[in-house]
Image (cartoon, rainbow, N blue to C red):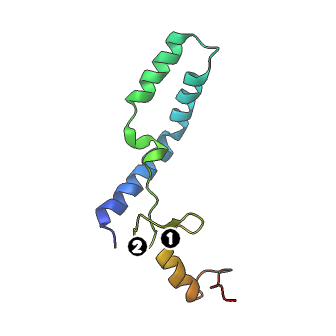
Amino acid sequence: MARLSSIESVKRIRKRVDSKKAKRAELKAVTGNRSLPAEERFAAQLKLAAMPRTSSATRIRNRCMITGRARGVHRKFGISRIMLREMAAGGLIPGVRKASW
């Protein structure tokens, strides 16, 4: 099981990303708009750089919702491959069952 602090850290980062998402998108739109003057685009670039690093969506680390495992996390279910196998074998995930042929 992952340390509780790493799980809480990811939760804090997700919260910050959600709160700053609109502002980041607005600034990125300004920096990518070639019809605006260069000074205005550069000012938007500086504001974007001044924002907290953890407000970027690339800082989010996918972790298992149950164990906190960072690797092998299935996006659709949000749980690790190990928990997915255990829960599917136990019939705890609707519509999923172990393959056999």
Residue highlighted by disc 2:
67
**What residue sits 41% from the left and 64% below the top?**
70
Q: Which of marks 2 and 1 is nearer the N terminus?
A: 2
Q: In this view, does 98 lie to the left or right of 52?
A: right
| Marker count (numbered) | 2
Residue 60's place in the image compared with 34, above or below, is below
Q: Circle 2 — which element?
A: loop
The amino acid on which the numbered mark 2 sits, given as a three-letter code, is Thr
Q: Where is residue 100 in the image (x, y as percent from the top left)?
A: 66, 88
Q: Mark 2–mark 1 contact, CB under 8 Å?
A: yes
Crowd band around label 2 with a 10 angstrom C-alpha radius: few (<14), some (14–19), many (20+): some
Q: Which mark is residue 66?
A: none
Q: Is residue 54 left or right of residue 24?
A: left
Q: Position of residue 49 (x, y in %)?
A: 41, 28
**What residue sits 51% from the left and 34% below the top?**
24
Q: Is residue 13 left or right of residue 89?
A: left
Q: Where is residue 18 in the image (x, y as percent from the top left)?
A: 50, 46
**On the image, which quarter does residue 66 sit in?**
bottom left
**What residue sits 50% from the left and 70% below the top?**
79
Residue highlighted by disc 1:
79
Q: Which of 81 and 100 is in front in this view?
A: 100
